Image (cartoon, helix red, strand yellow):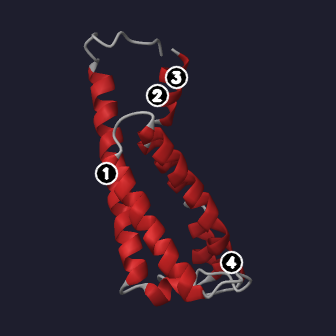
């Protein structure tokens, strides 16, 4: 894709892409705020199942602090629309999803039930969604566009 002049009218494809990316960004922000709120309220026990037994911290502390982190990350995702902040938040979101992955692996390896993941097959299948969350965060942050802007 060639760089565009800022004054040039965007194509329909570019407008649709921007709208979809914006919707994805709002969806991700809402997802994170909701998940963080659930960490602190009604789903606290379910989230404890994802804390690895080898963690040197109390499982409830991990759940509470990760809940606060998700709420903050979700709020930042919803609020940061301009580059380079938007891309930075997208990258932080992607790193967050990478950081919680060991907990999901531990849930599978330790055969802990939680969120309806009551078989090894379900827990294993869930692991394949983590890369999608990482990609979602990067896409919502429009990190490719920010990189292009930085090189122009």
Mark 2 or mark 4: whose residue is earlier in sequence: 4
How many residues crowd mark 3 within 10 Å: few (<14), some (14–19), many (20+)? few
Q: CA distance from mark 2 to mark 4?
A: 35 Å
| Label 3 element class | helix
**Residue carrying label 2:** 145
Q: Are marks 4 and 1 in contact (CB under 8 Å)?
A: no
Question: Of tags 2 and 4, which is closer to the observer?
Answer: 2
Q: Which mark is residue 106?
A: 4
Q: CA distance from mark 4 to mark 1?
A: 30 Å
Find residue 87 and report its horizontal and vertical position in percent: 47, 39
**Label 3 to label 1: alpha-carbon separation:** 24 Å
Residue 142 in the figure: left or right of residue 62 = left
In front of the other: label 3 or label 1? 3
N-term-proximal mark, 4 vs 1: 1
Residue in the image at 64% along x and 80% along y = 107
Which residue in the protein does label 3 denote? 150
Closest to the observer: 133 or 149? Answer: 149
Residue at position x 55%, y 84% in the image = 61
User: Looking at the rendered structure, which numbered label has been put on residue 26?
Assistant: 1
């Amino acid at each position: 894709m060639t760089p565009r002049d800022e004054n040039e009218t965007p194509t329909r494809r570019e407008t649709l892409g921007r709208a979809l990316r914006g919707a994805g960004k709002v969806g991700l922000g809402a997802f994170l705020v909701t998940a963080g709120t659930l960490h602190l309220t009604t789903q606290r026990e379910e989230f404890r199942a994802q804390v690895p037994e080898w963690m040197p911290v109390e499982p409830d502390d991990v759940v509470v602090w990760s809940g606060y982190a998700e709420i903050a990350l979700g709020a930042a995702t919803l609020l940061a629309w301009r580059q380079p902040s938007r891309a930075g938040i997208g990258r932080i979101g992607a790193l967050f999803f990478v950081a919680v992955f060991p907990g999901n692996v531990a849930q599978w390896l330790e055969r802990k039930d939680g969120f309806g993941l009551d078989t090894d097959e379900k827990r294993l299948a869930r692991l394949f969604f983590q890369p999608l969350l990482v990609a979602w965060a990067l896409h919502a942050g429009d990190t490719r566009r920010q990189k292009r802007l930085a090189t122009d």
